[in-house]
Amino acid sequence: MSSDPLVIFTPSGKRGHFPVGTPILTAARQLGVDLDSVCGGRGICSKCQIAPSFGDFPKHGVTVSETALSDWNAVEERYDRVRGLNRGRRLGCQATVQGDVVVDVPPESQVHRQVVRKAASARPITMDPATRLVLVEVQEPDMHEPSGDLERVQDALRDQWGIEHVHAGLPVLRKLQPALRKGEWKVSLALHTPANTEQTLILDVWSGFHEGGLYGLAIDLGSTTIAAHLCDLVTGEVLASSGLMNPQIRFGEDLMSRVSYVMMNPGGDVEMTNAVREAINTLAGEIAAEAQVDPALIMETVVVCNPVMHHLLLGIDPVELGQAPFALATSDSLTLPARDLDLNALNAEAQVYLLPCIAGHVGADAAAVALSEAPDKSEDLVLIVDVGTNAEILLGDRTRVLACSSPTGPAFEGAQISSGQRAAPGAIERVEIDPDTKEPRFRVIGSDLWSDDPGFAKATAATGVTGICGSGIIEAVAEMRMAGLLDASGLIGSAAQTGTTRAEPEGRTHAYLLHDGTADGGPRITVTQGDIRAIQLAKSALYAGARLLMDQLEIDTVDRVVLAGAFGAHISPKHAMVLGMIPDAPLDKVTSAGNAAGHGARIALCNRAARTQIEQTVGRIHKVETAVEPRFQEHFVAANAIPHATDPFPELAKVTTLPAVAFGASGGSDGGRRRRRRS
Ligand code: FES
């Protein structure tokens, strides 16, 4: 047995004997312990902090004396003086082994640290981004050894970090010489190594040690909204989240009308490409300003989107996606320079990663949902519904996963709704209607009070009550159904039929008055018959898509349902089921996942292996094309009724009884007369 001291690392449990005088960082590297370093052991970056433990450790069979590590050296003292080192911490590159020792590697010193999950359903992320920072010390030029500065940087990366096949573009070459000389031949480099390659691109260079951090953007590019998270590429932390409306809306509200616009207007695709790229640049600038980060430090972005958005972002004419067989220009993942997409708000060498598309109408956003929610690893049969203008639907378990995309239209996002608005302060997001009095109460974004609570007017004075957002309209329609204001066919009853003057005539139909703010100069917020129709179309498309996948597996029920989407976290499972958005399931088995596509984008941004994983998973997902499945129309028509014309909802019946009212001349569903839109 070795007489050299024993070094035990926690929490990994890795151990080994090392000669007296070995730096802890060296021991960690030899044992494959996950201990970070950016400066390569020069005592500059402080990423290698460790916490030694002293005393008896019967579990490990060692006793650690106070002298098990070398004394503080001048580098640690200077670091502590200038920056401060937490009590009990040492720099792993400076402290050397003197005797048996137990060394803890705190989470922030682990390269592959796990990002704490916020939502219970969100999968934890292990940090392993494609872009990382290293510091190198480069040989000075020599008259007798004529080599370029870049070649000597390449040598330094090989010798000091074991990194080979390094190249650099013109923006970096232009900065390299002054950076090297200013840094006295020490430079920090942002290196980008995509998954599955040996090639490394230098994205940027700074003299000396770069303290400004490296950042990435995870973008969920939807038909109606564009949402982005700005992430720290070292910690994985989300520093800011923001969103804006997709400016392509002016060319058509849904996808197919945008494809039609391109067909009717030569050059229309270029207009839409420019509009979305400009919007992403604006969003990147805004989100960086909010987080007080220099946008030039955004080194990478991951974009998830549906196939039409995908093609328009890339500047590829999407007309093939408007007709069967819905051929994509490519379904593979892509890694591209951001400048090729005119994303000039980011770093000059920033890279873009687009997740693979599943096929036809099932895009990279569905792939991102699969990455986030991992149906392919689920023991039970899970239905995942990502609610947006186009819904992404996944059904499966460890044995098989099916996917489809369904044209719900923008109603769930508050568009096409008479009093609809984006989810912003002042928007009604929760609704309750008393089944006896038919009187409503509601909550708006920005206040926790209900509208009949004392102090509501004061609490909402700044924002007012401005409209109704996606989750609000879902609750309003479901509550109207539960209160007997709406029949199963979706007709709103008259004042005489419902017994409330809130049911107002509107042309030949009726509307329900939710809030009248006119006395204070605010709007009258009603739910009109047209709103109900828009919601019925959207929910029927969603339900029909889910049923189509269930048909393929020859099943009538699922074990659990996950509601995802930009506002997925805000949809009440009970209201979604009353409306018939989702198939019947025990209510406690219906959960919300928040923005799963956005979370999937964040996973791919922070972890290279996840990119490889989803590229492989996508190949195994079986895609169902709703546009050419004859049963889709049949399911769609039956799903127009609230909750459904034919499918039973036994689990829903356990928690609520829907009144048997009928307000139409025939009292039956008029669903068969309505036509489905494809978006
Ligand atoms: S490795 Fe950078 S300070 Fe220790």
Image: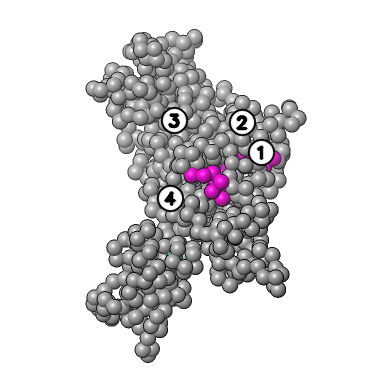
Q: Secondary structure at mark 2?
A: helix
Give how far across and how far down residue 68 sits, in percent.
Answer: 31, 78
Give the residue type at disc 1: Leu
Query: Residue shown at 53%/63% (left/top)?
Result: 135
- Disc ID at residue 423: 3
Q: Secondary structure at mark 4?
A: loop
- Disc ID at residue 237: 4
- Disc 3 from disc 2: Cα separation: 19 Å
- Disc 1 from disc 3: Cα separation: 26 Å
Answer left or right for 221 relative to 490: right
Residue 200 is at least partly visible in this image: yes
Above or below for 197 versus 618: below
Give how far across and how far down residue 564 sits, in percent.
Answer: 46, 41
Crowd tier of the residue under label 3, counting other residues whose Cα lies within 10 Å: few below 14, some 14–19, many 20 or above: many
Residue 334 is at least partly visible in this image: no
Indicate yes or no whether the magenta region holds residue 304.
yes
- Disc ID at residue 248: 2
Farthest residue to the front: give it.
143
- Disc 2 from disc 1: Cα separation: 10 Å
* Cβ atoms under marks 3 and 2 closer than 8 Å: no
Q: Disc 1 designates what residue? A: 312
Indicate yes or no whether the magenta region holds residue 66.
no
Q: In the rendered structure, which disc, 2 or 1, sits on the residue that comes first in sequence?
A: 2
Front label number (1 vs 4): 4
Q: In the rendered structure, which disc, 1 or 4, sits on the residue that comes first in sequence?
A: 4
Q: In the rendered structure, which disc, 3 or 4, sits on the residue that comes first in sequence?
A: 4
Q: Secondary structure at mark 3?
A: loop
* Cβ atoms under marks 2 and 1 closer than 8 Å: yes
Q: Assign the N terminus to one quadrant of the image.
A: bottom left
Query: Residue shown at 40%/42% (left/top)?
Result: 592
Answer left or right for 616 relative to 502: right
Look at the image and give the residue range highlighted in magenta.
Answer: 293-315
